[in-house]
Image: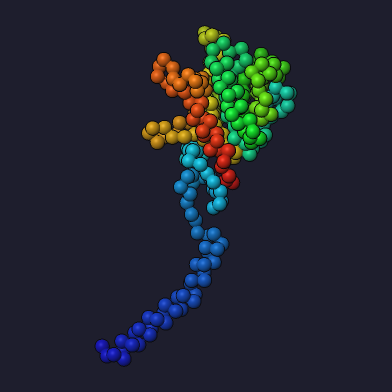
Amino acid sequence: MSTKSTNYSYIGIAFIILVFGIIFIPRIIDRIQGDDITRSESRSKDVSTKSDSYVSDLMFININGAPKKVPQFSFVDQDGQTISNKDYEGKVYVVEFFFTTCPTICPRMNRNLIEIQNTFSEFEDFGVASFTINPDYDTSEVLKAYAENYGVTNPNWHLMTGDKEVIYELANVGFNIYAGENPEVEGGFEHSGNFALIDKNGYIRSRKDNFGNPKIFYKGILSESEKENEDGETEEISILKEDIAKLLKEDYNE
């Protein structure tokens, strides 16, 4: 091939590159500026965040491939007010299922929740949602006396009562926290004694276990001072406090 032919070839290639740049590069820039190119988030495919927002290392509880969100609920609290899941929007909160005449684990659970309440007393965006599993007895008046007896002072701590079947559905399906009637056990009711932790956007969150899986729930019976029980189970109130603090710092939008 002659030198002249070679020069023509280079000129042709350069011309093609120039045309490509003129036509296609502005289109690529427009797509990027218009955010048409999909970006995947490493924390969750289903929870979108702004680039300048903060999401902690706590896991989202995924059910059927989607982050588990608190189901809708509406009950009456200790002050006779109707409280729904919407009243907890923008707040980090702990969920429990209990009953006021519980002779075994409930007093321990609620003493631990009082300790948590006092730890985060300066945070207006922290709360507790307590659902009674014995609503036939636990009226608003009974719950009010119970709250005063234990020292409930957080205005975002609602002890709620309502239709029994709806509450059991909320516990067993909505939160997967077992609760039910059993006349053969002391007190006539049984439940797990676990707490669920909810973020400001209504998602159930937890830390990882030693195998990298979500813990899902926090043991609510053992106190920090007890450390562990006779079965070797360690307390989880301390890690619950740590994780509440993490969620209180979060700032992300769906």
Residue 204 seen in the current view: no
Give the residue at the far right of this rendering.
80
Reply above or below: 66 against 104. Answer: below
When the figure is inspected, residue 94 is found, relative to residue 89, above or below; the finding is above
- Residue 228, compared with residue 49, is above or below; it is above
* Colouring mode (rainbow / by chain / secondary structure / one colour): rainbow
Q: Nearer the viewer, residue 85 or 163?
A: 85
Residue at image location 62% in from the left, 33% down from the top: 126
Q: Position of residue 70 (x, y in %)?
A: 58, 34
x and y percent of residue 125 in the render?
Answer: 64, 36
Report the number of discs: 0
Q: Residue at x 56, y 42 (%)?
A: 250
Q: Quadrant of residue 130?
A: top right
Residue 239, given in percent of the width and then of the height, sits at: 49, 30
Q: Which image quarter: residue 163?
A: top right
Whether residue 250 is visible here, answered yes or no, is yes
Instruction: Give the residue displayed 66% in from the left and 23% down from the top.
Output: 152
Front-lying residue, 63 or 121: 121
Q: Is residue 9 left or right of residue 29?
A: left
The quadrant of the image that shows the N terminus is bottom left
For residue 142, side relative to residue 198 (left or right)? right
Report whether 200 appears left or right of 230: right
- The residue furthest left is 1
Residue at (55, 34) in percent of width and height: 244
